[in-house]
Image (tube, grey):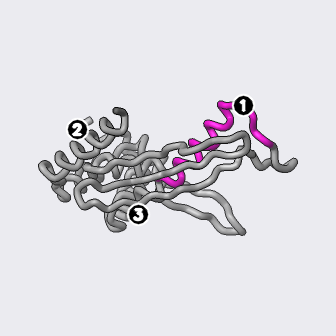
Amino acid sequence: MKVSREVQSVQAALVIAKKFPRDETEAYNRIMKSCQRKSLAEQAIYEYPRGGTKVTGPSIRLAEAIAQNWGNLEFGVNELDRDNKSSTMEAYCWDLETNTKRSMIFQVDHKRDTKQGSKDLTDSRDIYELTANMGARRVRACILAVIPGDITDAAEEECKKTLKAGNKEPLVD
């Protein structure tokens, strides 16, 4: 019965996506407006040191904002299997309108690397936080693989402009 309900839910989402296709211009405008919010702009780009250089890119928060405003997308992360040592996870993003889908299945060892060496995790909250963090990174990659690259680039630039201008919130807010 649960499988039947899931199938009906997916079919309904596909029908609605075809019946109400996205207006790309309107979606683009919504994305740009979202990027004018200082609170999003501050979280929009990640940065961390790696090998003497800085690695940067759009954060999961920016990817989620783009996906929500682009519309007709389904995205998320599922835990497929878990044992005492690891979890098998799936991250995905599906454009219901174009039927473009990107998914990743990956393994998360229940370990945390520290400067004192690797530490096995046994607390369910620690395991949840680790798998959610690893899942969010893969969901971001899946969203960015489905959304056109020029849209993501424009959103990043708009966030940078927002931070330079010191905007608090868009005037309409």
Q: How many angstroms separate mark 3 from mark 2 (CA)?
A: 31 Å
Image coordinates for residue 108, horizontal then vertical, percent:
65, 50
Q: Assess whether residue 7 is covered by the magenta stretch.
A: no
Residue span colored magenta: 120-139
Residue position marked by numbered label 1 in the rendering: 123
Q: Residue at x 28, y 48 (%)?
A: 69
Badge 2 element: loop
Residue at the outermost right position = 116
Badge 3 element: helix
Q: Amino acid at mark 3?
A: Ala
- In this rendered view, identify the residue nearer to me: 61 or 172: 61
Residue position marked by numbered label 3 in the rendering: 145
Q: Are marks 1 and 2 in contact (CB under 8 Å)?
A: no
Image coordinates for residue 134, horizontal then vertical, percent:
59, 49
What type of secondary structure mainly makes up the magenta span? Answer: helix
- The N terminus is located in which quarter? top left
| Label of residue 172 in the image | 2
Q: How many angstroms separate mark 1 from mark 2 (CA)?
A: 45 Å
Q: Amino acid at mark 2?
A: Val
Seen in the picture, residue 68 relative to 25 is either above or below; the reply is above
Seen in the image, is 21 located left or right of residue 104?
left
Seen in the picture, residue 144 relative to 6 is either above or below; the reply is below
